[in-house]
Image (spheres, helix red, strand yellow):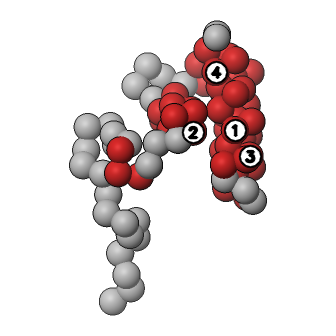
Amino acid sequence: MSEQDRFRAAADLALRRYPGPVGELIHRELSAYATFGRQFTTDVDTLIPHLATHVLTGATHDSVSHFGRPAPGPVLWPSPR
C-alpha cells in the first residue's frame, strides 16, 4: 500500500470510526494530506502521519505516543477555577 493509499484509507475509516464533525474534520485533513503530501509540511511535522496511524490501528488514548511526552490524562483541558 502506498503512502497516499494509506492516508486515503485512514480518511475513509475516520468517517466510520468518529461520526459527526470530528470524523469529517479528520477525513478532510487526511484526504488533503494524501492529495498534497508533504508539500506544505516540514520534516518535523509528524502530526498527520501520527493521526493516520492512530485511525488505522484503532489505538486507544493510553497507547498513543504523544511525541515523546507522557500521554495526557483523561481530561484535556483544566477545569475553570
Front-lying residue, 20 or 56: 56
The reply to whether dot 1 and dot 3 touch (C-beta < 8 Å) is yes
Residue 55, located in which quarter of the rendered image? top right
Disc 1 marks a residue whose amino acid type is: Leu
Q: Residue at x 38, y 85 (%)?
A: 80
| Disc 3 to disc 2, C-alpha distance | 10 Å
Tell me how far mark 1 sits from mark 4, CA to CA: 11 Å
Which of pointers 4 and 3 lies earlier in the amino acid sequence? 4
The CA span between labels 2 and 1 is 7 Å
Q: Secondary structure at mark 1?
A: helix
Q: Quadrant of the N terminus?
A: top right
- What residue sits right under mark 4 in the picture? 6
* Quadrant of the image containing the C terminus: bottom left
Q: Would residue 39 be visible to someone looking at this image? A: no
Q: In percent of the image, x 35 and y 44: which residue is there?
A: 63
Which amino acid type is marked by label 2? Val
**Relative height, residue 30 to residue 3 (above, below):** below
Residue position for label 3 = 15
Residue that extends furthest to the top in the rendered view of this protein: 2
Q: Is residue 36 left or right of residue 72?
A: right
Q: Find out whether the residues at labels 4 and 3 contact each other: C-beta distance under 8 Å.
A: no
Disc 1 target residue = 13
The image quadrant that residue 21 belongs to is bottom right
Tell me the residue that label 2 is attached to. Answer: 55
Q: Secondary structure at mark 4?
A: helix
Within 10 Å of disc 1 (Cα), the crowding (few <14, some 14-19, many 20+) is some
